[in-house]
Image: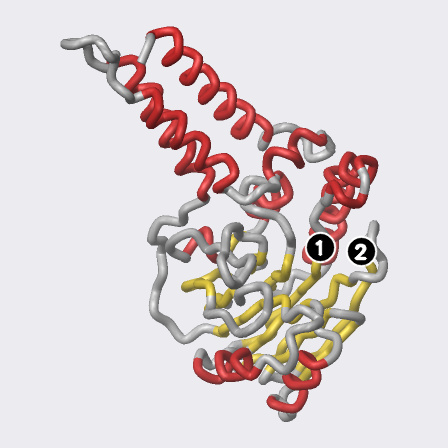
Amino acid sequence: MKAGTRALILLAGLIVSGLTLGAGWLPMENPLHTAMTMPPPLVWSIPLVFLALLALIPPREKGKKTPPGAKWIALLLMVVAGLHLGLAMPGREQPGKGIKVLTINVHYDSGALPKLSQLIRDEKIDIVLVQENKGAPLDALRRDFADWSMVEEESHAILSRFPLRDSGATGLVNRPWRRILWATAQTPKGPLRVVTTHLSAPQLSRGIGQFRRAGAAKQEELEQILSVIESDPTPTVFGGDLNNPPAHGFTRVLSGKLENAFSATGTGLGWTYPATLPAIRIDHLYTTHGARPLRAFVGSNVGSDHLPVIAEVIFP
């Protein structure tokens, strides 16, 4: 490979690295932030790995080797590619007897989802946060767990093997047909407040204007969610289909104020969507006000287009 070609390849890799990493620190209102942080991680990781491998091709001339500087830059590109994957290293996962919370977007058209009911039983889940729960999925859960407490609002629901009290809901500031739903579970270990919601993902198909405003909308929704969570000091678990990957400012800010259960105690990529071939982590569980995760993991495919996220939580 000619030196000039190698230099161009490395320059392209550095530009992509700078854009993808730097965009994450731009204000959420900036459309570049949305465009660079919302795609699945492989959208950026694969090109970076490809450019790094190209840069390592040795020169055609006999006796010449790949320059050491090129090797170091190629290694840097590989590291950046790995950072985009959002790999969670083995955290402080601990065995324990906490409260097990599951969140899942069941998708309106999924049907009864008997595998979900079986997963809840097998994993001894205590509280379930459900999004897109209209129709058959909710009817099946209501039937299979008839002795559980349940509160629902529009397409959101909370099911609990413990009594639920102090429930409430409010419409999202930008999408009032979607709700922030909350309730307090009276567990044997004490009250545990649970909050769930379902946020939208920005889509170019809805027009450039909607896409440009997506970041500002996320900021407003973040402030509203934090206001609901901070309004009650009871130990709290918050989760749902947030449509925000770890690289997005929404997730980073929220993870700075609350504890992301999978990031803290999970292992691996934690990708939850689409269920048949997961490529991105957009379903999350968080803890705050004294609640903390013991372990967290992604559940098996139960027939929805999302995979469930499960966390075991303890609190004072």
Give the residue type at disc 1.
Answer: Leu
* 12, above or below 35, in the image: above
Q: Which numbered tag is attached to residue 172?
A: 2
Residue drawn 54% across the image and 71% down it: 101
Q: Are marks 1 and 2 in contact (CB under 8 Å)?
A: yes
* 118, above or below 198, in the image: below
Q: Circle 2: is it few (<14), some (14-19), or many (20+) Cα within 10 Å?
A: some
First of labels 1, 2 by sequence position:
2
* 262, above or below 126, in the image: above
Secondary structure, mark 2, is loop
Name the foreground residue: 274 vs 64: 64
- By what rule are the colours in the image chosen? secondary structure
**Cα distance between the residues tagged 1 and 2:** 9 Å
Image x and y of residue 53, in percent = 33, 27
**Which residue matches tag 1?**
199
Give the residue type at disc 2.
Answer: Leu
Q: Hey, which quadrant is residue 148 in on the image? A: bottom right
Nearer the observer, disc 1 or disc 2? 1
Q: Hey, which quadrant is residue 108 in on the image? A: bottom right
Image x and y of residue 205, in percent = 76, 44
Indicate left or right for 297 with 275 as reference: left
Q: Which numbered tag is attached to residue 315?
A: none
Whether residue 266 is visible to the viewer of this picture, yes or no, is yes
Image x and y of residue 151, in percent = 73, 78
User: Which image quarter holds the N terminus?
Assistant: top left
Q: Hey, which quadrant is residue 146 in on the image? A: bottom right
Indicate left or right for 171 with 93 as reference: right
